[in-house]
Amino acid sequence: MSIPKVVGIEEEYALKVTGADRLTPFQASSFLINSYARAKGLRRPGMKLLWDYAHETPFQDIRGGLFSKSTNQEIISEEDNLRINTVLPNGARLYTDHAHPEYSTAECLSARDATACDKAGELILLEALEAMKEELPTSEVSIFKNNVDYQGHSYGCHENYLVDAAAHEEYFVRNPEKAVTGLIPFLVTRQVIAGAGKIGGEGRENGETKYQISQRADFLERIFGVETMYARPIINTREEHHADGTRFKRLHLILGDANMCEISAFLKIGTTQMVLQMMEDDFLSVDLALADPLSAVKRISADFTAPVDLVDGRRLTAVEIQRAFLEMASDYLEKGSDPGIPEAEFILEQWTYALDGLEALKLSEDLRLEDDPLGLARRLDWVLKLWFITRFREGKNRTWDPQGLRVLDLQYHNILPQEGIFSRLQRQGLTERLLSDSHIARFVNEPPADTRAHFRGKCVEKFPQEVNLINWEVVGFDHGDVHRMVPLLNPLKGTKALCQDILEKAENSRELIRFLQSGERE
Amino acid sequence: MSESRFAQKPKKKREKKRDESLEETASSQVSPDMKQKLDELDDFIEGVLEKAGEEFLDEFRQVEGE
């Protein structure tokens, strides 16, 4: 039985640090985060807003007992906790993860809001940089929203979807072949609408590739797995659900790219919501199992028109496989199934448009964009990147120089308006927008109203002196003699509709808890 | 939840209208306004490359992320 597809995006940004201060990337990342926290009034004397690691189990596998490393978690000092973490009034977490500043959006119900929250993260990082420059004027830092450094390293843009616990158990624990048949072909081929584009390739399969669709494809080595920094899987099986695990599970996907185009991001999230909902309702009726999903993900990335082998002997292109999922989704809606997904029809319209556009898209052997009748270069990252690279090469009859093009590739993802190529393209009206600037700006300070993020964000905004420990599933208050924890085990509770009254009425967190205990909200 | 969400199956529109907004950029018939935009874009991209310098890729080195 399907449940609403709450979604959150985790974006690991890259930093390029130069300047006289000689900060390491870790120091720069932590400086950024704390400069922003100070600017937002979250580091005043007496405040101790700590991230609660109690619910994180990165080495525990959903399939049970497969511990690849010690599960003994290191105890982090309060000083270090504050150095690398901050939770924001918009319900998001901004922190340092392996020297990357990571922005984890608050939980969203709709793909549109999730896209807006992800874009709000860019604005927050820019504000953080401004705040850092005020404190450290000689620092020179650029911030990039991408997934590869061209020196063999990759960093992620992870997606998290709320999944019904029974369906999760069935598809990922008891009968993972059902996921291989139904979900994996969708995920492997999704890159044609959501890939960020990349100059060149890495590894055995794509080492000679000039241009490919996905930044992450070359780094995928497993179908299922618990790791995230090596042996990366298509579906991450970390046993960490951040909710009442008897009812809710988290599907943690680490194969996606960081998107700059709003439509690419929206399609990535919205189509995945649709397919997961169909999975929960046993509606993924067509067997599209790939003979070798890991080879297919790389092959499609290198050539989106290349057919890949299915287990049943057929050979289909990525667009044909995506089209099969789109048709299932259309049938799903036509039969009156309630997807509970905001803008379900709009998602399918955009999906249809993108696949029609890909069927008509023509590239030359030399990877020039020859015909793009539906204007995907205004909508999808990998096509837009290829468009400006084609233009750059043709302008002065340049050959395919990977070094120079890699610089341009990276600068496409630079979020600084004065340096970033995507930012420039968007300002010049050369991209199709899905969101208004005000929608994005709202999520810089405001949490989404329709998930538990509202409660979390408003507690941080209103009672920052009193919040002591916080994470996705709990808000803890320090009341001196006792610590009071408010569990947020249902991501669909704690919403504005349920909590606005008491959050506005309460003058402090003791009063808030009294209201909660007296049942003044659901 | 409105019924309209489910009322219509999205129609496949195989004969979609061409999106000419970027196509104009590839043609010799670009409007003066678009030509100026594209010239500015070209200058910007050339500037990006020039400013980056040869050390850009080396300086970009990251650590493995999740």
Image (cartoon, coloured by chain):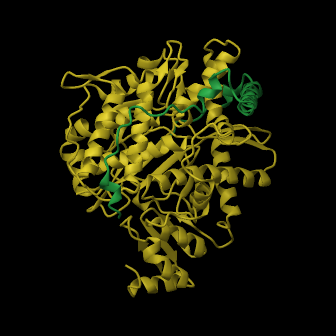
Chain colours: A yellow, B green
Q: Quadrant of residue A98?
A: top right
Seen from the viewer's position, the closer of residues A297 and A421 is A421
Vertical relation: A332 (above or below) A374: below
Which percent across, then down, holds residue A376? 51, 32
Vertical relation: A256 (above or below) A81: above
**Residue A260 visible:** yes
Residue A106 placement, left or right of B15: right
Residue at 42%, 46% (x, y): give it: A269
Residue at 64%, 52% (x, y): give it: A123
Quadrant of the frame with the C terminus of chain A: bottom left
Which percent across, then down, holds residue A11? 52, 46
Quadrant of the frame with the N terminus of chain A: bottom left
Residue at 74%, 34% (x, y): give it: B33
Residue at 51%, 38% (x, y): give it: A155
- Count the marks: 0
Which percent across, then down, holds residue A190? 39, 36
Residue A497 placement, left or right of A400: left
Residue A355 placement, left or right of A209: left
Seen from the viewer's position, the closer of residues A136 and A424 is A424
Which percent across, then down, holds residue A184? 30, 36
Q: Quadrant of residue A348?
A: top left
Vertical relation: A351 (above or below) A403: below
**Residue A153 visible:** no
Seen from the viewer's position, the closer of residues B11 and A318 is B11
